[in-house]
Image (spheres, rainbow, N blue to C red):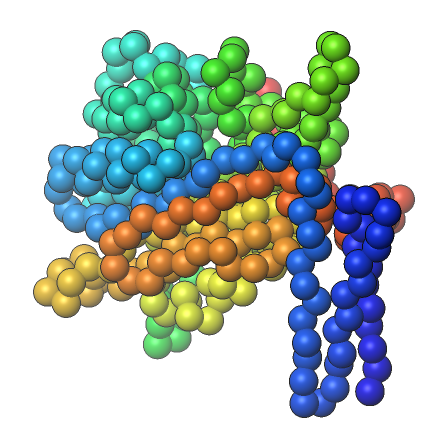
Amino acid sequence: MSVLSAAAVSPGAHTASYAATFSSAQLQPVRMPPVRQRPPNRVRLALCQMRVTADKRANLATAARDIAAAADGGATLVVLPECFNCPYDTSRVRGYAEELPRVGTSGTVRHGSATLAAIQVAARRSGVTVVAGSIPELTPLDGCLYNTSMVVGPSGELLAKHRKMHLCDVDVPGGVQLRESTTFTPGHQVTTFPMPTGEAVTPPTASPDVTSGVGAITSGAQGRPVSTPLRVGVGICYDVRFPELSALMARQSGAGLLVFPAALNKALGPAHWELLLRARAVDNQVYLAVCSPACGGADDPDEKRYPSWGHSMIVSPWGEVLKSAQFEAEIVHAEIDGSLLDSVRTALPISKQRRDDVYRTEVVPRPS
């Protein structure tokens, strides 16, 4: 039998040790390091696992109700599922497609997207930031269709857009066959944004200092502690299978929370869902959240065509599942605590131990 010990430093003049014992019969897990006692930078997150139907108006009404209910539960950041305004069916999504305005469009500017307008109204009424799952986005000049997530601030401003980067082309024998690339065009941008603080909104840009965008405490003009806004990274469903994207959002852009609207199915969900989410959270020492649609009823033709897995989930930077839905429609909440991010990264300082002289993960410049 061998013993592996790890130590984490907590506030004050003491060190707490945590031991795990490996044997053929038993593995005792190492406990999460204690949160440092200082003013935390907290965000209350809500995932709306909503039922999606073929009726766009009904879907938008459900999304608006869920956003209001999440806000009533104290949420400041609300997430909707992938393809929340239409069924996940590549043969029909073009009929639900909408043109979207540019990032930075305020909540008072008229535009052609009924879905974005509904989310802007809901966000303003509840005073929350919404990661609006995804919708089919049509670009009129070239006719391309993107699977696009929209981030709307509490004032209704369109803070960011993420176009699904990795398209799901899979063929699982006896399971599921998908060819998203026959319908959608892949996106090319790594997307992060800072949580709005009520001040001037910082545009979504990459930050070279990983420690500066995760709710860190910095010194203000008078030397007083000032909490920096939590930076949030956005991907869509299949994007989570590619660790490089999560690494870029966390390490290069400084995100402390990664959010993936998704529409996972029952063929792959039981095998890979929780495993992938916990792995990405631990790899990058971030919170990770995935929001899925609820399962339809037994008589729902869309459920028969694409059986939803549900199981929207929030995972801590220590790899713990904080909250998980099941199959039915529900809203799950959890606190995103910047001080826990710092504690985990102090206990396991892998960002300082990474061998950038041997390997790197970088964004490839694209022609302008």
Q: Quadrant of residue 253?
A: top right
Q: Residue furthest bottom?
A: 25
Quadrant of image for the C terminus: top right
Q: Nearer the viewer, residue 362 or 144?
A: 362
- Residue 164 visible in rendering: no
Relative to 158, residue 95 above or below: below
Q: Nearer the viewer, residue 271 or 288?
A: 288
Q: Position of residue 172 (x, y in %)?
A: 41, 70
- Residue 80 visible in rendering: yes
Q: Residue furthest left?
A: 299
**Which residue appears at 28% of the width and 52% of the height?**
330
Q: Quadrant of residue 264?
A: bottom left
**Which residue appears at 76% of the width and 78% of the height?**
21
Q: Position of residue 223 (x, y in %)?
A: 76, 15
**Which residue appears at 52% of the width and 11% of the height?**
200
Q: Residue furthest front?
A: 13
Quadrant of image for the N terminus: bottom right
**Which residue appears at 42% of the width and 32% of the height?**
76
Q: Position of residue 245 (x, y in %)?
A: 60, 44
Q: Nearer the viewer, residue 144 or 340?
A: 340
Relative to 159, residue 233 above or below: below
Label total for image: 0
Q: Nearer the viewer, residue 203 or 325?
A: 325
Q: Residue furthest right?
A: 357
Relative to 193, residue 52 above or below: below
Q: Position of residue 128 (x, y in %)?
A: 37, 27
